[in-house]
């Protein structure tokens, strides 16, 4: 006896129905990962897009022909040739990051999305380089990157793609242009060094002149102070003479002469001090004036 003989007709039908239901559940349930989206077609036409999580489709009618990753992607770094406004040939290295946000557009509107984006970026870069001079390309790289990113984002919008980053990594020159720029750079450095040296010498001369002027001013001030002091002393003597008469002046002079002779007599050993007649008269006048006081 075989299994069919053991089972009745009703049992076979139930088993068939159960098997069919299992197949339907297997075909109708779709668990979509967080990093993907599923494009569902029915009879060859777009029906819906399944997001992350548990989803259900109609078995035997719906199918999932495209499973699209929505992770951010990076195109391989590419080199694009460009000619600047001043006719300099440059090679621009670019890098583009993007992600798919509308899989239905990406699937049905573009075949090779990576190649399409690379071609678009190359055209935009050449166009933007052509309106800039070489110095502007080197100095305004941030502005160039911003323009490339905006134009790329606008052109790939119909493909359901979001450009997250578009970078200009490097701008390379041919050897002849590079050598000419190096000569120009060296000449500019030499010019700056010469100017700096000349400015240094000029500043040193200015500082030396300022120092001499300051010294002259200070010496003049010192002479003025000395002259003021001498004038003040003369004025004091004149006032004293006018108040006390000529005798007071003679008395002070006689005292100074006595002090000077006393200092001479203080030397060691025996000394002979020769006094002029004027000194004797000074002593006499001093003692006479002292007696009067």
Image: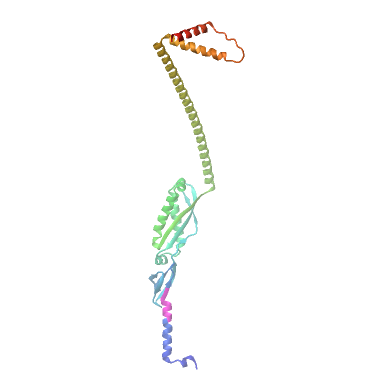
User: Which image quarter: residue 35?
Assistant: bottom left
Query: Magenta residues: mostly which secondary structure?
Result: helix
Query: Is 193 above or below relative to 274?
Result: below
Give the residues drawn in magenta, as a range.
22-30
Query: Is 68 above or below relative to 227?
Result: below
Query: What residue is at 42 percent from the left and 17 percent from the top?
Result: 232
Q: Which residue, as the protein is rendered here, is positioned at the far bottom?
A: 1
| Colouring rule applied to residues | rainbow
Q: Which residue, as the protein is rendered here, is positioned at the far right?
A: 269
For residue 26: magenta?
Answer: yes
Query: Is 88 above or below relative to 234?
Result: below
Q: Could you tell me if residue 197 is visible in this image?
A: yes
Q: Position of residue 101 (x, y in %)?
A: 40, 64
For residue 226: magenta?
Answer: no
User: Which image quarter: residue 151?
Assistant: bottom left
Front-most of residues 207 and 260: 260
Q: Could you tell me if residue 44 is visible in this image?
A: no
Q: Which residue, as the protein is rendered here, is positioned at the far left?
A: 47
Query: Is 110 above or below relative to 196?
Result: below
Q: Position of residue 207 (x, y in %)?
A: 48, 30
> In the displayed structure, does residue 200 sit left or right of residue 10?
right
Q: Position of residue 279 (x, y in %)?
A: 52, 8
User: Which image quarter: residue 231?
Assistant: top left
Front-most of residues 54 and 271: 271
Query: What residue is at 42 percent from the left and 83 percent from the top?
Result: 20
Q: Position of residue 29 (x, y in %)?
A: 41, 76
Query: What residue is at 48 percent from the left and 11 percent from the top?
Result: 253
């Amino acid at each position: 006896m075989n299994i069919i003989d053991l089972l009745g007709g009703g049992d076979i039908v139930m088993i068939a129905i159960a098997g069919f239901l299992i197949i339907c559940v297997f075909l109708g349930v779709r668990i979509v990962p967080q990093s993907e989206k599923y494009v569902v077609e029915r009879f060859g036409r777009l029906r819906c897009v399944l997001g992350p999580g548990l989803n259900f489709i109609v078995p035997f009618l719906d199918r999932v022909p495209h499973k699209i990753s929505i992770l951010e992607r990076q195109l391989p770094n590419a080199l694009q040739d460009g000619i600047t406004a001043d006719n300099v040939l440059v090679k621009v290295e670019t890098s583009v990051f993007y992600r798919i946000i509308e899989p239905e557009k990406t699937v049905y509107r573009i075949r090779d999305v990576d190649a399409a984006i690379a071609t678009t970026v190359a055209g935009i870069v050449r166009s933007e380089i052509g309106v800039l001079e070489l110095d502007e390309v080197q100095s305004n790289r941030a502005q160039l990157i911003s323009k490339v990113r905006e134009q790329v984002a606008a052109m790939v919008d119909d493909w359901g793609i979001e450009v997250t980053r578009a970078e200009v990594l490097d701008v390379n020159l041919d050897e002849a242009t590079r050598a000419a720029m190096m000569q120009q750079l060296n000449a500019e450095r030499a010019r700056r060094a010469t100017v700096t040296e000349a400015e240094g010498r000029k500043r040193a001369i200015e500082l030396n002149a300022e120092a001499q002027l300051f010294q002259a001013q200070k010496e003049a001030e010192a002479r003025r102070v000395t002259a003021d002091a001498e004038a003040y002393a003369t004025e004091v003597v004149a006032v004293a003479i006018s108040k006390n008469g000529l005798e007071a002046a003679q008395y002070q002079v006689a005292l100074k002469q006595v002090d000077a002779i006393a200092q001479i007599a203080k030397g060691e050993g025996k000394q002979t001090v020769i006094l002029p007649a004027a000194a004797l008269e000074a002593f006499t006048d001093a003692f006479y004036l002292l007696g009067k006081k």
